[in-house]
Image (tube, helix red, strand yellow):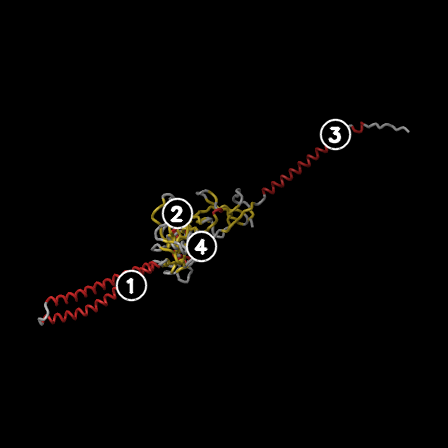
């Protein structure tokens, strides 16, 4: 059986002119459809972009605050006006310590004792000397009584011509000598009493007491150590027993740049906030401005005292146990009452500073009414932290834009961000 060899039909694979025209026409239609779709998409996107409402954040203009505005901020530390390092008046060895850090002490309370054995021996010796003088006075008085009797007898015998004048003079001299000895002994008693008081003071000097009521913030000596009112013995001798502070005398000390010291005046109201309690605003006032400047730091020291309450039952911040020496504190110097009253007569509203746009000569805000922006020119007053006073242009309860695109313009429809 023979098979016929396969012969490819090359004519069937040949591209004729009709086929070429048909394929070209199909491709042309595809590109036309793609172009139409792209044009439609661009048109829809452009229409959506042009008609899209800008999203903005708004706040409501508030009424002017009745609180005084801050004119200057500064930072400093809590400093007690009464702070003392308690030391002994004499050099001695510590035999007792009766306090610890944080102990509250009253005036005159015993803090520590020193070895007083030598002082007590000296006191006993002084008392013995006084007793000796007192005993000598008693003996001299007995002798004087007998001498006066002898003198009286000698006087009578001399008047009768029995004894000589020498015997009378001798008796008178004996009596006068005893009187002088008695006077000397009395003076010795006075001197002995003075020495006794001196030695008693030396004994008392071995007792270290609190000079005022307060709290012990440091314990500087231990039992067995030597203490001295002056530095002696190198590092082996302490010069203090304790550091005592009166918490009722706490005040604030801040350094104000000399460029802004003109904004500070005595009795100026101040708001103080401790770094440890940032939500606690403590009322205070300027006590004094130290009349000298620091050349290196170009600052002036200002001392601020806590405001005392008007009634005794009100809370006194100066006595609050949360206020401790050397705590960090930030203060805001406030405007005086007269200046604050004058400015309140002009301010009509308060808005965030981010709501105000424009240059110094032309300030404006964007007010939102029924979803449409209204550009309103405003007159700006003083800044109050992150807010600013508006003197004219808007009224309280007006919704103003605080955040939005940079392309905002008058009459633009916007969408308020919820």
Mark 2 element type: strand
Callout 1–callout 2 Cβ contact below 8 Å: no
Establish if 167 lies above or below 210.
Answer: below
Mark 4 burial class by Cα count in 10 Å: few <14, some 14-19, many 20+? some
Callout 1–callout 3 Cβ contact below 8 Å: no
Establish if 7 lies above or below 386.
Answer: above
Identify residue for label 3: 20
Callout 2–callout 4 Cβ contact below 8 Å: no
The answer to whether 49 appears left or right of 165 in the picture is: right
Quarter of the image that includes the N terminus: top right
Q: Which mark is residue 256?
A: 2
Q: Label 1 to label 3, Cα distance in Å? A: 147 Å
Figure quadrant of residue 218 = bottom left
Compare marks 1 and 3 and give the one earlier in the sequence. 3
In percent of width and height, residue 267 lies at: 36, 53
Compare marks 4 and 3 and give the one earlier in the sequence. 3
Mark 4 element type: strand
Mark 2 burial class by Cα count in 10 Å: few <14, some 14-19, many 20+? many
Q: Nearer the viewer, mark 1 or mark 4?
A: 1
Mark 1 element type: helix
Q: Which mark is residue 128?
A: 1
Q: Label 1 to label 2, Cα distance in Å? A: 65 Å
Establish if 406 lies above or below 69.
Answer: above
Q: Label 2 to label 3, Cα distance in Å? A: 92 Å
In percent of width and height, residue 401 lies at: 51, 47
Q: Relative to the observer, which residue lies in front, 340 or 393?
A: 340
Q: What residue occupies the far left of the structure in this picture?
A: 161
């Amino acid at each position: 059986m023979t098979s016929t060899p396969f012969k490819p039909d090359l004519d069937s694979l040949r591209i004729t002119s009709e086929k070429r025209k048909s394929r070209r026409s199909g491709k042309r239609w595809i590109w036309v459809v793609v172009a139409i779709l792209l044009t439609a998409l661009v048109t829809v996107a452009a229409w959506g972009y042009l008609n899209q409402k800008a999203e903005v954040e708004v706040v409501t203009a508030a009424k002017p605050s009745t609180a005084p505005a801050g004119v200057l901020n500064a930072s400093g530390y809590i400093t007690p006006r009464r702070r003392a390092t308690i030391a002994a008046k004499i050099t001695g060895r510590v035999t007792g310590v009766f306090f610890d850090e944080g102990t509250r002490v009253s005036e005159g309370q015993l803090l520590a004792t020193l070895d007083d054995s030598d002082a007590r021996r000296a006191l006993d010796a002084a008392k013995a000397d006084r007793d000796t003088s007192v005993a000598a006075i008693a003996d001299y008085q007995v002798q004087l009584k007998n001498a006066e009797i002898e003198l009286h007898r000698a006087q009578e015998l001399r008047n009768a011509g029995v004894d000589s004048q020498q015997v009378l003079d001798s008796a008178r001299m004996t009596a006068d000598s005893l009187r002088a000895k008695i006077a000397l002994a009395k003076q010795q008693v006075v001197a002995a009493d003075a020495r006794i008081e001196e030695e008693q003071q030396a004994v008392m000097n071995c007792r270290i007491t609190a000079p005022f009521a307060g709290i012990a913030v440091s314990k500087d000596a231990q039992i067995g150590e030597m203490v001295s009112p002056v530095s002696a013995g190198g590092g082996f001798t302490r010069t203090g027993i304790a550091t005592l502070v009166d918490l009722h005398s706490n005040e604030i000390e801040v350094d104000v740049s000399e460029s802004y010291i003109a904004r500070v005046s005595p009795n100026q109201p101040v708001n103080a906030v401790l770094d440890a309690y940032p939500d606690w605003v403590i009322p205070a006032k300027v006590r004094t401005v130290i009349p000298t400047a620091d050349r290196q730091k170009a600052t002036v020291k200002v001392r601020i005292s806590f405001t005392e309450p008007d009634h005794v039952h009100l809370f006194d911040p100066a006595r609050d146990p949360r206020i401790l020496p050397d705590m960090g504190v930030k203060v805001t110097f406030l405007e005086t009452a007269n200046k604050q009253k004058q400015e309140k007569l002009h301010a009509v509203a308060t808005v965030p500073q981010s709501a105000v746009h424009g240059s110094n000569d032309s300030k404006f805000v964007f007010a939102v009414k029924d979803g449409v922006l209204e550009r309103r020119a405003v007159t700006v007053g003083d800044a109050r932290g992150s807010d600013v006073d508006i003197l004219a242009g808007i009224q309280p309860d007006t919704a103003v834009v605080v955040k939005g695109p940079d392309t905002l313009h008058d009459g633009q429809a916007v969408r308020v961000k919820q």
